[in-house]
Image: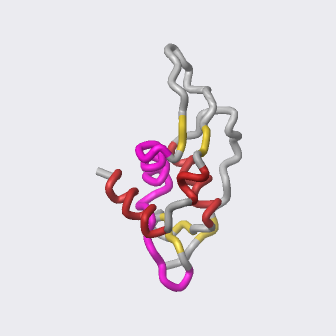
Amino acid sequence: MKLIKIDPPDRSFSRWLTDEEVGQVLAHSRGWRLGSDGSVVAGTLRKLTVAPSLAALGAAASANRWISRPARAGSDGSGPTHMMWGVFEARTDAEVAALVAASVP
């Protein structure tokens, strides 16, 4: 499996990021790679599949409250996305993989 470096998204946190963009931010911060099948992989020797896709990682981040998107009535979706770095970084790669697997239907 060829692993590809994941770069952070071009958009800023001053707007809501999509689930895929949130996944990019989280994967980039941990140095994870994108597998040839689109999965997010941790490690170079012992490859651990963390999530089936960047979008799934971002959706799990929202479900597990690793990110915060303030709700406003009538919002056009342009509110800020806040990363809860302490909550996310406290987890090991295996814990993140288990939480993502539990969040993905």
Residue 83: x and y in percent read 60, 45
Residue 76: x and y in percent read 56, 20
Magenta segment includes 64: yes
Does 46 sit above or below residue 68? below
> Residue shown at 54%/66% (left/top)?
34
> Furthest-bottom residue in view?
45
> Residue shown at 60%/36% (left/top)?
81
Report whether 63 appears left or right of 77.
left
Magenta segment includes 80: no
Q: What number of labels is visible?
A: 0
Residue 70: x and y in percent read 54, 28
Where does the magenta region start and end? Answer: 44-65
Does 4 sit above or below residue 65? below
- Nearest the viewer among 35 and 72 is 72
> Residue shown at 70%/46% (left/top)?
10
> Furthest-left residue in view?
105
> Residue shown at 69%/33% (left/top)?
14
Does 38 sit above or below residue 13? below
Give the image's coloring scheme: secondary structure
Residue 103: x and y in percent read 35, 51
